Image: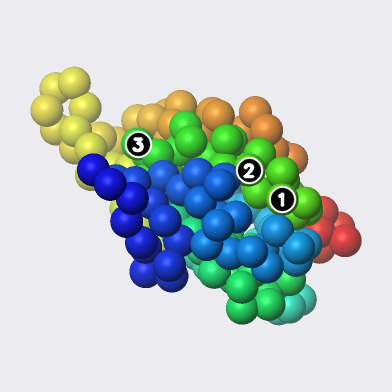
Amino acid sequence: SGLSRGRFGAPFHGACAVTAAAVQQSSPSSTHLRMRIVLVTGLSGSGKSVAIRLLEDVGYYCVDNLPPPFLLEVCAYLADTDHKDVALAIDARSETSLVDVPNMISTLRGFGNDVRVLFLTASDTALVQRFSETRRRHPVSWRTNSQGSETTVGEAIAMERELLAPLNEIAHVIDTSGLRPNMLRHWVREFVD
């Protein structure tokens, strides 16, 4: 298929796999405007919402649950609209495109942006406890296990760890297992300062 235009005018092929040249072509100012981009990722229940809320409170433009294929397109749009501090949350719900994120980060850095990746994690025990306390379903639990039944919280956590492994390897990691939200907010603030 040919080159198309996305919602914000950035060219894309198929599922919005924007190339570095496409972002530069669609957004000349984005190559001149240096943005601070914080990519918040990690395990469900580890505190990503706490981190995103803190970043919003300190002046970052925040996008939660961004599907990875739109990462470059959204950054190009935000650069064109003069946003200098941007925080984007990406999680395992978009599992098929997570492997592309490290290359997208390299592309953004290649344009002179300060891109920081924050990966929040916690022990399986802490995550299972948090999900049982909130009575929320794990976002990956809709998948079926090898027996054809819905996965347990523990199985979902294991799948999510595997899906997010490429991002864990390139990120600043904070283990929130025994961490209170106030301390997490303090550490996130230190990470971006």
The location of residue 179, given as percent across then percent down, is 71, 51
| Crowd around label 3: few <14 · some 14–19 · many ≥20 (10 Å) | few
Q: Is residue 117 left or right of residue 135?
A: right
Q: 55 or 81: nearer the eye?
A: 81
Secondary structure found at label 2 = helix
Q: Are marks 3 and 1 in contact (CB under 8 Å)?
A: no
Residue 28's quadrant in the figure? bottom right
CA–CA distance between discs 3 and 2? 19 Å
Camera-side residue: 45 or 32? 32
Please, what secondary structure does the residue beneath circle 1 have? loop
Q: Amino acid at mark 1?
A: Phe
Residue on which the image places disc 2: 107
- Residue 96 disc label: 3
What is the three-letter code of the residue carrying label 2? Thr
Residue at point 28%, 47% (across, down): 2
Query: Residue 183: image x %, image y %?
Result: 78, 59
- Position of 51 relative to 173 (above/below): below
Label 1 to label 2, Cα distance in Å? 7 Å
Is residue 193 positioned above or below 62 on the image?
Answer: above
Residue 111: mark: 1
Residue type of the residue flagged with mark 3: Thr
User: Which of pointers 3 and 1 indicates the residue nearer the eye?
Assistant: 1
Label 1 neighbour load within 10 Å: few <14, some 14-19, many 20+: some
